[in-house]
Amino acid sequence: LVTTNISPYAGLLYTYTSRARWEEALKLCRWCQETQCWAALAGMAVNASNLDAAEAAFAALNHADKLEYLQYIKDKVFSQQAKNAEMALFKRQPEEAERIFLEGSPPLLYRAIKMNIKLFRWERALELAVKHKSHIDTVLAYRAKYLERFEKQESDPRFKQLSATVSWEWEQVKAKKDLEKQEEAERAGVSFFAGSNSSHK
């Protein structure tokens, strides 16, 4: 037999969240102040992509890294499409996140490529850039930065071949990124200021 402590408020919390009564779920957690309740609320809020409830839960749990990422999604990600993709990535579903980034018209290509770069999925990042005939210089620039940081030499034949034929400059890479972010923001009806995004960009 395995014994464990189950909060007496778990059933009520599930009832609230399953019916999208998030304010009542938050009030319950604030009233009982049980770690188990906050943890359960955090999981259910993330699963439902409710950023406000998830943010409150992770704040109560003192999970600063998760809280920071949720605040980034709320404040620095412009379109609902991109927010949905970032939430999929938050749930450790990179393939789903990539699919969402690319399903729009136009696709959020920079975000999809940069996500793969941040996950060190270099081959996939380059594959997307070549397929869409855009951001090849972006991938090469970040690849060069990565190799320099870790004092490595390029060993991938595909990257070697493209590096010999495609030139890049950081200013051009940044300008292209800012243009796509600006266009995304305009479609979402919000303002974008170049260089205003956080380190998650």
Image (cartoon, rainbow, N blue to C red):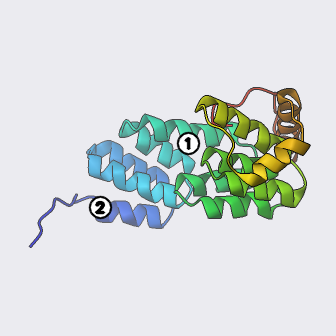
Crowding at label 1, few (<14), some or many (≥20) Cα neighbours within 10 Å?
A: many
Q: Position of residue 121 (x, y in %)?
A: 64, 53
Which circle's residue, 1 or 2, is located before the other in the chain? 2
Q: Amino acid at mark 1?
A: Leu
In the picture, residue 192 is in which quadrant? top right
- Tell which tag, 1 or 2, sits nearer the viewer: 1
- Please give the name of the residue rendered at 67% of the width and 47% of the height, measured from the top-left corner: 155
Q: Quick check: can you spot residue 79? A: no
- Please give the name of the residue rendered at 88% of the width and 37% of the height, measured from the top-left corner: 176
- Please give the name of the residue rendered at 78% of the width and 41% of the height, measured from the top-left corner: 140
Label 1 vs label 2: CA separation? 24 Å
Disc ID at residue 10: 2
Q: Amino acid at mark 2?
A: Ala
Crowding at label 2, few (<14), some or many (≥20) Cα neighbours within 10 Å?
A: some
Report the side of 6 relative to 31 (left or right).
left
- Quadrant containing the C terminus is top right
Report the side of 180 relative to 22 (left or right).
right
**Label 1's element?**
helix
Q: Position of residue 5 (x, y in %)?
A: 16, 59
Residue bearing the label numbered 1: 70
Q: Residue furthest left?
A: 1
- Please give the name of the residue rendered at 28% of the width and 52% of the height, measured from the top-left corner: 36
Compared with 41, 186 (above or below) is: above
Q: Nearer the viewer, residue 168 or 128?
A: 168
**Label 2's element?**
helix
- Quadrant containing the N terminus is bottom left
Q: Quick check: can you spot residue 191? A: yes
1 and 2 marks in contact (CB < 8 Å): no
Q: Nearer the viewer, residue 167 or 51?
A: 167
Q: Position of residue 186 (x, y in %)?
A: 88, 42
